[in-house]
Amino acid sequence: MAHLPTRSFQAHQVFAANTNVGKTILSTGLVRAAAALAIGAEKKRMKAFYLKPVQTGYPVDCDARHVKTYAPLVETSRLYAYPDPVSPHIATTEPPPDTEVLQATIKALRSFKQSLGHADKGWALLETAGGVNSPIMSGELQSRFYRPLRLPTVLVGDSHLGGISTTLTSYESLHQYGYDIPALLLFHNKSRNHEFLDKYLAKAENRPLVHVLPSPPEKLADPAADAEQLHEYYKRTESYFRHVVEELDRAHQQRLDRLEELGEKARTKIWWPFTQHKTVKDVTIIDSAYGDIMTTYVEPSKDAMTATGDNNSSSSSSQDNQAKEWRWREMFDGCASWWTQGLGHGSPELTRSAAYAAGRYGHVMFPECAHEPAVKLSETLLETVGQDWASRVFFSDNGSTAIEVALKMALKSTQDRYVHMGGQNNNTTGRIEVIGIDGGYHGDTIGAMNACSPNAYNAQVSWYKSHGHWFTPPTVVYKDSQFQITIPQEMTEGFSGSDPTLKVTIDNLSSVFAKPSESDPRLAIYRHHIRSTLTRLTQGEKRQFGALLMEPVLMGAGGMVWVDPAFQRCLVEEVRDFKGFGTVEPSYQDKSQGLTNDWSGLPVVFDEVFSGCWRLGRKSAADMLQVKPDIAAYAKLLTGGLITLATTLTTEPIFNNFLSDTKTDALLHGHSYTAHPIGCAVANTSLQTYREMESHGDADQAREDWGALSHGPLGVWSLWDQKVVDKISRLEIVQGVVPLGSVLAIQMRETDGPSGYASMLSQKVQQKMREKGDPEVAIFGRPLGNVVYMIASQVSTREQLAKVENILLRTLEGPL
Amino acid sequence: MAHLPTRSFQAHQVFAANTNVGKTILSTGLVRAAAALAIGAEKKRMKAFYLKPVQTGYPVDCDARHVKTYAPLVETSRLYAYPDPVSPHIATTEPPPDTEVLQATIKALRSFKQSLGHADKGWALLETAGGVNSPIMSGELQSRFYRPLRLPTVLVGDSHLGGISTTLTSYESLHQYGYDIPALLLFHNKSRNHEFLDKYLAKAENRPLVHVLPSPPEKLADPAADAEQLHEYYKRTESYFRHVVEELDRAHQQRLDRLEELGEKARTKIWWPFTQHKTVKDVTIIDSAYGDIMTTYVEPSKDAMTATGDNNSSSSSSQDNQAKEWRWREMFDGCASWWTQGLGHGSPELTRSAAYAAGRYGHVMFPECAHEPAVKLSETLLETVGQDWASRVFFSDNGSTAIEVALKMALKSTQDRYVHMGGQNNNTTGRIEVIGIDGGYHGDTIGAMNACSPNAYNAQVSWYKSHGHWFTPPTVVYKDSQFQITIPQEMTEGFSGSDPTLKVTIDNLSSVFAKPSESDPRLAIYRHHIRSTLTRLTQGEKRQFGALLMEPVLMGAGGMVWVDPAFQRCLVEEVRDFKGFGTVEPSYQDKSQGLTNDWSGLPVVFDEVFSGCWRLGRKSAADMLQVKPDIAAYAKLLTGGLITLATTLTTEPIFNNFLSDTKTDALLHGHSYTAHPIGCAVANTSLQTYREMESHGDADQAREDWGALSHGPLGVWSLWDQKVVDKISRLEIVQGVVPLGSVLAIQMRETDGPSGYASMLSQKVQQKMREKGDPEVAIFGRPLGNVVYMIASQVSTREQLAKVENILLRTLEGPL
């Protein structure tokens, strides 16, 4: 647990704009002033702690010793020391792992905090080594290394000539890593840098207070005389430093004030999406996030931990405080922040890409324009998820708009072919419909809603109208250590040749995706059902269709339903082969100027908003199905989890259909920020990272565990531990598990209460998981009816997932 | 014109990580090597130019003299010199204006370029002063000051202990300002910083090549001996520097390669929004943008300038080159990049806010969560555009989704009141419709489309269906120096008391928005027409309505149609007073727990996506109408022109309608990146800036010119010059002008050819404006049927707008 500050305990870190700018002297002055501060009516002294995690040039140089010498009341600690007076990454050839150094740092701060008595106030200062972006032993930059703590930063500026620049670049770097910088400290100097910086930063958001302090004396050759004059200096400057400490305290209290007010403000001013405000209990106050972790601040009375007792804390006084005080809780982002996280929160690489694009362009106009991030992203998408089928990229803002664009592309194409091009319109509904899968979900704009079967999401939307036929799908789950396929009764009953008690089980995950042999009974059942249904709809009911639309492999918001890949493949094949969608089949191939991937039957639209971009392990779910769509939509993981952007990919024949000499024949759809450079730049970095992870074999262990290696490029695996998933699959309370890529979905057996989206079962499990967690680390999940799901990012570590698996398993094994 | 590089001329800038890191020595080595480089078969030497725009400590220090001494072949220039060896902002108390210094810098580079012979190759180096973020004379940071040139940067790193940090922070700052950094130069030093930096930056996007160069000799006391050893140093290191120059040349040529390929790649891989690909002529290749300017790179044969002849260039040889070569063109972003630009392209403040939010959070989950940027934005919106009426903020991704959310809010509220709550549904259409204004436009998702009258945008959309009644609006234009109001004939004809030849003219812009006196004939006409229409629709046609939806004041995409404010006010009042929307009026006031802003008649929804956030001068168009809506949508200017984000604001009674104990009664709408922290942070900075501009009276001159001052807070003005607008209004070819805030729309008189959106007239004017422009500065506009419009950003300067007005006026006055 990285976050420790409370009302009575605060910690700051000191970063410097450069070496030799007086970091240690200023740090000493600060802790010395803190330790001298008398608090409250009893004039009790504040307890001060100085921590130097990394010291080089030791023991000749020892900043902690300097502190102890000139501020004897201060408790000091030094964690790693190396004799060479060089950068830590050079000082040792055997660097300790970053996680170890970070844990040691946290432990030192925590120990000091726990040593505080009930009525004590504590003040800790962590002094970094070198400058903001100096590396620590492993070579990681300090700015990144300390980021999980996100301590408020005291920036020591450079007072020398030229120091304005190093001070401001350091400030900009820290700001870009998401640090708050309440104070900027400078020595008084004839360059008067402090005056300029004070004026300049006055305009900045979260402006740091600029403090100017008297310059320390020139170093004397005689050690005793030097010590004497330094003692004198610290004494003389005490009031200056006290003022800084007081201002830091004010900023600290204000920060907590703001956090404590956030929940109530949000409750009264915000209308949350997908939220029944009347039943909201806790507001999760998110202070910041990094990697898979969201750092939250928890109201005392609303804290589930308090109720179940917190026995991990060694100090009973601090435990008492915890019950009464607001406290921090780190939460594993188990829903990947609505399925967006690919590269973790606060990724420096994504931030840097975003900042560069913002600085280079801001946003620029897109129609008939070209800019590098958009063109590069188009190329990359066509090389990856669009490989071997797509040739065009259309940009929009989110998955729902990407689907609306896809529908506009498909429906006009079909309309032009079957209705306008000499064909006879046998439509009796007055509308071109889609063929889809029951339980599918394609977004919340009304066009995308109308392309879904009636469900809980659209039930109350006045303008919703089901525009389609929805096939009930055969589904797959992992249950009792086997992949079990359930075929809807209507399919087996309707097919004379099939066994009504047919059960299909498969041992290996990759085999679920393998093309079944022609003797597999499923194929005949599926084909017969699809053909007879299509015939009935078009000839019997005289309905007209414009697209086949589906989420390949996994239907997400509809309840993490894993559709039998064999069925989806059959559906695509049968729709493409079916001749009854229009009464004529024009010689469209001739029009498409030699391109061979023209559509037949209906355009096949894949909604890969959830499943695309390596979510399920492979670059796309289409790739897993071994099906090439005519149109497909991508969003969410596309931008690694930073910013909204969506794309719709399509083939040249679909694109060609919109070409003419008439402006209004074009696809007249666009959004103001279409292909905004930030989104495109961030997506480029994300896709490049996913590709590198793939080529580096990052998932090889998972592939081996799930028996995917022998299937080569057709292998399928889960990032979740095979043994844990197996155990879960055998629990009585579990109907089945869906382990695909970073997704782990568990369908719970609902015994009493409503089923589906209205079920409260997963909410109950999520609540228990918060309780089962370590008091300071818990799992943030979102309920989805009777389905409990966990979605990792693409960079979650095995260690991190093991912790989550452990909590999950304990919760499911225990009483609910 | 800031951008000069061609295939045969390149310019770089040298920035340093700190002072005293050897910037001048490395600069000298580079220009010296460039001047010594033999090019092509004839082994002709490259011409080299060294430019030091700002020199302090002069004449004791003179970097240009140093260059001339050790590289006599190099042409050198120094622009501003000050005797004090201090930072430029301290060296003078009378700083020259930034624009003057920038123009002098550009002029120096251009003069050198123009001095080049036909077969010459030129190489220029601009050496900055101090570090990356050191200020120039005015106090502006160099990083920002030089940004319009966006020269490729040679970063001189710091080789000393601690120099990794200053080098990387400088790199991050430059990157954040949108610079490309092809080379990082370091001296060889025992800290081995170059090794670390080379390894570290290998992972970076657009990685700079790290070059390590031999350290220069220690300075000798004897000037002659020192000069001697420096001569020796430069001679000895020549091959190192030559290598850097060659690599820079390679990066330069690759950059131009990439830009030259962009257009063709975009044409073949991208599907542009709102674009008939078959008729696309030129692709605008946008290299970068700053302020109101987009820097574009123009293909030779497609360059309209070439055809009209370019007589401004003093050198005939460079003119020849221009005709054959690709060239740069700066374009004023006259459509504000689809009406998004508020604070200009590449705004450092917006970039910084975006980077901080990205670093602190990335994106985090929103439902039942709170984070500071979203809460702060909600507060600010409720204090500004939502002042005195709104209490809740719902977040979505763009204007279209914000309108769909608004519709869902309104339609369910009406449905619950009139249909479910004991009322009798007299609906015969099977659908709840909206009341709107003919010509309105609300976005491209199908739900938003269905809330518009049939138009060119929705004509070919299979699922479009008009769900509403559309009033033909009375409109306003400025024509022949008067504001003229045109009332549709159907209104005057249908009203017995009115004069069928009624003409209403108003002299003053603000008076157009003033509430008419009760004796104004318009009021009776409007009221009668609205009442009788509502009665016919509900009682005669038995139609059921769920919302009044309109763009207040100005209908944007529908053709910049300015609706008579008096009519929109009447419409709101009449709809709110009308008792015939449902057969019961339940005692809804009791349910709303004492809140007094419950809706009556129908919820009034304002689409302020275009008009909101100070676009028309005042914070909202609702404010100009003096009407409080029940629901309103904001996007575009909300984020200052950087990134997509939208909000829907509403009252507590609308919100309360979704409260119940049942999850599915909630507003089940949400997007993955709802309230993404970057968007919220950027919006906070944008709104804060607009508010400050307002409180600082930035528009006071415009208010005075347009006679708005005497109207106090009810004043209305245009940022465009009153005299120019007046001239335009009197042109024969102009039907009328709409001058409101940053918008200037000119309705052209279409004499032959299709009218409205299908008209090609504005396209013709836009084309002419590109030709009339300075050869190197032109106007980027988007055609909108017969309407020519220019939209400035909120920070466009009078000088900038005057240039645009000049081109516009010349174009309209000339033959088309």
Image (cartoon, coloured by chain):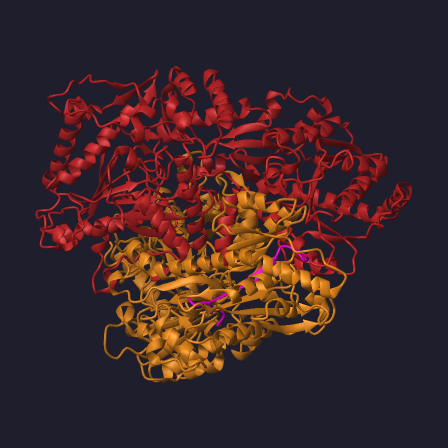
Chain colours: A orange, B red
Inspect this view and state whether residue A407 appears: no
* A319 relative to B245 in the view: left or right: left
* B500 relative to B682 in the view: left or right: left
Inspect this view and state whether residue A532 appears: yes
Q: Is residue B176 above or below residue A514?
A: above
Instruction: Give how far across and how far down residue B733 sits, in percent.
Output: 40, 17
Q: In this view, does A355 lie above or below B34?
A: below
Q: In the figure, residue B513 lies in which quadrant?
A: top left
Instruction: Looking at the picture, tell me which residue is in the foreground, B455 or B67.
Output: B67
Q: In the figure, residue A729 lies in which quadrant?
A: bottom left
Q: In the figure, residue B723 lies in which quadrant?
A: top left
Instruction: Give how far across and how far down residue A728 sits, in percent.
Output: 41, 81
Instruction: Give how far across and how far down residue B480 sits, in percent.
Output: 34, 15
Q: Which residue: 35% across, 84% down?
A: A814
Q: Is residue A540 above or below residue A41?
A: above
Instruction: Looking at the picture, tell me which residue is in the foreground, A533 or B334.
Output: B334
Q: In this view, does A545 lie above or below B759?
A: below
* B39 relative to B289 in the view: left or right: right
Q: Give the range drawn in magenta.
A: A1-21
Q: Does the magenta stretch include residue B353?
A: no
Instruction: Looking at the picture, tell me which residue is in the foreground, B86 or B33.
Output: B86
Q: Is residue A8 magenta?
A: yes
Quarter of the image with the C terminus of chain A is bottom left
Instruction: Give how far across and how far down residue A564 sits, in percent.
Output: 40, 71
Q: Dominant secondary structure of the magenta stretch?
A: loop
Tally of numbered discs: 0
Instruction: Looking at the picture, tell me which residue is in the foreground, B371 or B678.
Output: B371
